[in-house]
Each structure stands twice: as structure tokens, then as C-alpha cells.
Image (spheres, rainbow, N blue to C red):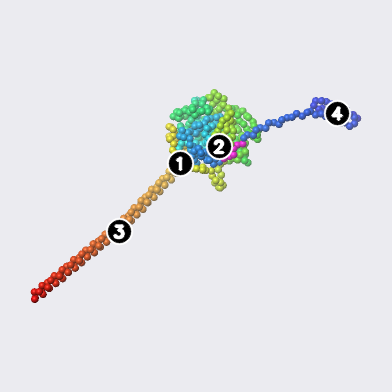
Amino acid sequence: MKRVFIILSSGLALLVVACGPTHVVVQSETPVYQAPPPRVQDAPAPPPAITYQTFYDALSPYGQWVDYPGTGYVWIPNAGPDFKPYSTAGHWVYSNEGWTWVSDYPWGWATFHYGRWFFDDNYGWCWVPGYQWAPAWVAWRQSPDYYGWAPLAPTVGVSVSISSYNPPAHVWSFVPQQYVTSPHVNNYYVEENKNVTIINRTTVINNYNTVNRITNNNTTINNTTINNVHNTTNNTTNNVTNNTTNNNITNNNVTNNNINNTNITNNKNVYVTGPARTEVEAATHTTITPVTFKEGATPGGSQVNNGQLTIYRPQVKTPPPATSGQSTPAPAKVVPLNTVRPITPPAGQVGSTPNNQGNPPPAQQAAQQKAAQLAAQQAAQQKAAQLAAQQAAQQTAQQKAAQLAVQQAAQQKAAQLAAQQKAAQQKAAQLKAAQLKRAQQRAADSARRASGNN
């Protein structure tokens, strides 16, 4: 019986006819080498989380840490009386997280992205550390001609009170809109004595960025939502398990989901992103490409090269509970506030205060009132002590005067007694002399009588 096999290989048909056992040899197609897909480069790992101790240690060479009443440890930079945060030695760049302040100071990585600033009439600008990172902790205003920004005070909540934030006029920095992106923006600031007029012609920019950080099994999930009142185009990168997707979205709401392996306490972060990019592009007649962030490994100055901003921005861990027994972060050297050399503020800065309403923050007011009450109590106690000392001194003087009077009386009595004794002695001597004289007279009389008888 014949067996017929039809074998198809690489488009070639072979007809094999055989009787009995059949052996078939099939020649396969030559394999083609396929290179593995390129590996997506891992995103740089974020720097290790820090505590306030890093702030205390890294900033100490550049200023003084003081224990400020009602606030705690604050830092006063050695930057001179003309220093103003988010104004001196720095400029703005745009990122997908909003307008970012790039400082020329080696300590700018901390003081312009964590914590808040307030102005003290005697000591100038003071920085309060914070746990949350932001491109800049400022409020923004705009008019058809100007953009302006001002540091947020420690007590101002962005999502609650930013619309009513009204700090002293001198803390604002205003520039003509076309210069807001200039690397030398400090050359275009409007004179501060014109700030009041400009403020009255500007409106608040209410563009917020909300960041929720949730820690679960040593994984921190950052959910970022950008809410802009103007339509903008944002480039958002979602990095999950080394897979990168670039989404170009034209919308008012953009959400970034970033997963990083860190161990950070849960928190929520809200900050102002500044003017819409499209508006700034129209004002400056340029196309603005957002910079990307490169994580710096150590504290230091920020740098922008080839559209990439290198900046140190670690997560900040909250302090352990007081019952944990762990040490609490603190500056190695704390300078008493009353020993800090007062500044001579530039014109227009006299009379300003740390918060937005021209008054100290409520906590500071309470602390100041408590300090005033304590000072009054201490003054009263000192006065009472002085009065008691005076009374004791008077009593001592009276006692001494009494003792002296007793001594004088004794001396007078002794003198009187001596006088009496002397008078008695004189009287006795006189009596004795009289007696002697009489005896002599009698003797003479006797002698005369005897001679007369003879």
C-alpha cells in the first residue's frame, strides 16, 4: 500500500510517495535573530528622607537659629538688610508642577521649597521649616501689565485663605509681564513704593496644585492634581514599574500618579502654581518648554542645564512621638533673640509684620500676651522684692538706730554718773577742807587761850 505525504515548508510543497517504511526529511527556514526590546531606563531614585535635623545642620553656616516666641526655631540668614525671599538672587522656571523658584543661594533648596517666611521689624526675614515640598510657597497676583508674588506667611492655608491673603505691600515683588521668565528678573522689579497702586489694580491667581501622599508598606503614592482656571496643555508622565507613558492633555485638570519606594508619613500638600503657561507665553512672545526635575543627591544650589533642573528635594519625616524615647531634632547652636543684631530695613519695610493682616499670627499674639503677662508678673515680683528689701533695710536701720540710741543713752548715763561722782568727790574734798580748816582754827584758838592764861 502506498503512503502519500504532503509536506509544506516555507512555501515549498513536496509530494512523497513511498511503499513500506517512509523516512521524511524536512528542511526548516533559517531563524532570524531578533534583538530584545530596549530596556526603559529606571528613573533616578529619590534621595533618602530627612528630618528637621538636616535643615538645622545644613543652614547653620549661612545664618542663625533663634527660638522665636510662639513659633519655635526659626532661621535668620546672613544675607544683608536688602534680602527678600523669592526676589533676591534667583529666577522662575516653568515645570509640570508649576512655576518653580530657582535660587542662587546654596541654602535655597530648603528655604524656598519647604516651610514659610515672615518679616520681623527688628530682625528682618525669618524662615520657619516645613515638611512639604513645593516649587515655591508664594501667592500670585496679576494685572494686564504685571505679575507679582509674595512669600506665604506660616499661618496662611493655601486652599482656605489665599484669596484673602493681604500681607504688607513691601513683601510683594512685581515685574512687567514680559520679564517674568527672565533669568535676570531682579533687574526688572518695580520700585516697592509703587506696590500699593499695583496691588489695587491686580487680582489673585487661583491656580492650585494638590498633592496627596499615602504611605503603605514602604511605598509612597503621590497623587497630583493641577487645577487651572485657564485651559492649558500639560505634559504628564506616569511612571509605574519602569514603564513610561507621555500624555499630552488639553484640559483644566491634570493628574500625575508617581510611585516611589520611600517611607513617609501620610500628608496633604496644596500650593499655588502661578499664572497659566499659555498666558505667560503670550506675554513674553516665547514658547515655554517645561523643565524636568533631576533629583539632587545632597544639599546645595539648584542648577538648570539643557531643560533639566537639578535640585535636592527629599521627603521630610515627621518627628517621632514624645513617648518613643527618640531624640528630638534641634539646632546645635541657638542664639537668643535679644542678642541678634537688629537690621536697618530698606525704606518702606518699617511697620510690617509676619502675617497677612498686618498683625502677628494668633499663636504669636497669644504667646506675646502670655510673655507680657509673665513679664508684668516678674516686674511685680521684682518690685515686691525691692520693697521687701527696702523694708528690711529700714528695719535694720531702725534697729541700728535703736541700738545706737541705747548706746548713747548708756554713754550719757555713764557721763552723768561720772559727773555725779566727780561732784561728790569735789564736795567731799570741800567738806574735808572745811573740816580741816575748822580743826586748824580750833587749834589756833586753843593755843591763844592757853597763852593768855599764862
Badge 4 or badge 3: first in the primary sequence: 4
Closer to viewer: mark 1 or mark 4? 1
Q: Which residue is mark 1?
A: 337
Q: Residues within 10 Å of mark 1 (few under 14, many from 20)?
A: some
Q: CA–CA distance between discs 4 and 3?
A: 153 Å
Give the numbered dot on residue 407.
Answer: 3
**Secondary structure, magenta segment, majority class:** loop
Residue 243: where, in percent of width, then height? Answer: 65, 33
In the structure shown, which secondary structural element does the residue marked by tag 2 occupy?
A: loop
Q: Which residue is mark 2?
A: 299
Give the numbered dot on residue 5.
Answer: 4
Badge 3 or badge 2: first in the primary sequence: 2
Q: Residues within 10 Å of mark 4 (few under 14, many from 20)?
A: few
Residue 20: where, in percent of width, then height? Answer: 90, 31
Q: Quadrant of the C terminus?
A: bottom left
Residue 306: where, in percent of width, then height? Answer: 58, 28
Badge 1 or badge 4: first in the primary sequence: 4
Q: Is residue 48 magenta?
A: yes
Q: Quadrant of the N terminus?
A: top right
Q: Are marks 3 and 1 in contact (CB under 8 Å)?
A: no
Q: CA–CA distance between discs 3 and 1?
A: 56 Å
